[in-house]
Amino acid sequence: MEWTRAARYRAYDQYSALELMKLQAQATASPAQLHYHIRPQSGLLNDPNGFSYFNGEWTVFYQSFPFGAAHGLKSWVRLSSPDLVHWTNHGVAVLPDSDFDSHGAYSGSAHEVDGKLFLMYTGNHRDADWTRTPYQLGAWLDQDGRVTKLAQPLIDQPETVTEHFRDPQLFFHGDRWYALLGAQRATDQRGEMLLYSAPAVTGPWTAVGPIKLPLADLGYMVECPNLISVDGVPTFVFCPQGLPQAAASYQNIYPNMYLQGKDFDYQAATLEGAGELTNLDEGFDVYASQTFNAPDGTAYLISWVGLPDMAYPTDEQNWANCLSQVKELHQVDGQLVQQPVAAMTSLRQEEHRFAGEVETITPDGGQQLELAVTIAANQQGTLYLAASVDRKQSVQLRFDTAAGELVIDRATSGPQPTPDHGTTRTLKLPAKADLKLRLFLDHSLAEVFVNDGRQVATFRYFTSQENTALAFDRPTTASGSWWQLADQNQ
Ligand code: FRU
């Protein structure tokens, strides 16, 4: 079907329950469907929103267009979890049903305040002539899951920015609330982040100013900005669309980067002692990541696995995308590392160990598994994931633990997402060193944690579910374990 503007913005109540049920059944029956990640019940999922701790549970929402694989009229769907791994889906929470969010309840964040969850998000409003006005809106989620929107916007578009002004991240610091927003400057159409503060979440919100970073140019728009503390280190996680390659190289259509500093001055909105702008994820498909500091201070991260302006093979089955697993962020040897949360091991089934000169790890491990492997230093070879019997179809991880390189190649895995942005990604590794991988497959999603999370590569692949071998291309000195993984609820 053709996704005309009228089709994308058709009101939710114009669809019948039967249409929605058919789409849900189609998504559930898809061979590529995820079994232990957050996935859309139907239609398209994009950014994680409102990632928070509320009422003794972890909460996350996602941007949803439930009626097809298109970026149409967006709402928020809510999930909660006791352990960041097993999620219960509570259905749609924020509908685009007010004048301020008439063309989409866009991305935002959440924070517990006095026994309720406060949501701060962008209302996407368009006039009859399709002129856009972004409003930063507030809503309360109570303990029974009811959402009550505030009657008036919290922050209006300032004159200094264009219509691209969205994705507030709400957090508390010292004795004030802060909201960090992505924006495009009006004067030169370049990207920036804006900081606001308020004595209470409901306002009054006043501008602190643009975030000052030692970077010449942030592209033409910053989406989904976050500021968190990772073991005390101030860390920005954000999506600078159109970032010049000179600032940091990346291959995806739009980058998701992080930048750490020594200190953040809240009054001056300045990051002091900034390090290097770095790719958050070395794979093909991470965007719009959201992070927050839990009540105990630990920083957690979850990402949209999917990118704007990309087509994916499941589009023709009327659904698209998923969220990554949640990662815990830490500072190790002065570097940001991303690790699976502890409860991920609760999905493990029987353990299968291997060691020595290994060739086939398993001929039929399925595509819902975890592999932990150490490949000894000074070897070259290929590790095939989701491989066919003749190994002609697979995701290839080509390693060189002498020179220190890992190439991820999805070209031979089957139908490709929009291929304009390459079919390989190359990771630099320490030379002449063992390579440690912890790797998760979920039917069409791979998450590869390299050397205890010093690098992570997340990507989709779309292969026949009959391709279930896990093997090296030659005898390789390696040891480790693999486990099939259980479904999580949802
Ligand atoms: C990022 C984004 C956000 C926006 C949302 C709309 O993927 O474009 O900037 O709020 O998606 O769904």
Image (cartoon, rainbow, N blue to C red):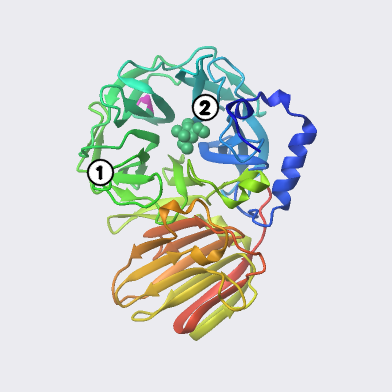
How packed mark 2 is, by other alpha carbons closer than 10 Å (few <14, some 14-19, many 20 or more), is: many
Is 240 within the magenta?
no
Instruction: Decide: is 405 above or below 23.
Output: below
Q: Relative to 272, is 440 on the left or the right? A: right
Residue lying furthest right = 18
Q: Measured from the top left, where is residue 21 in percent x and y?
A: 77, 39
Q: For marks 1 and 2, give the CA distance.
A: 28 Å
Q: Which mark is residue 172?
A: none
The disc placed on residue 119 is 2
Can you tell which mark lies on residue 261? Answer: 1
Give residue 296's quadrant in the image: top left
* Amino acid beneath label 2: Leu
The stretch of residues the image draws in magenta is 175-179
Q: Quadrant of residue 270?
A: top left
Q: Position of residue 105 (x, y in %)?
A: 55, 26
Q: Quadrant of residue 185?
A: top left
Quarter of the image for the N terminus: give it: top right
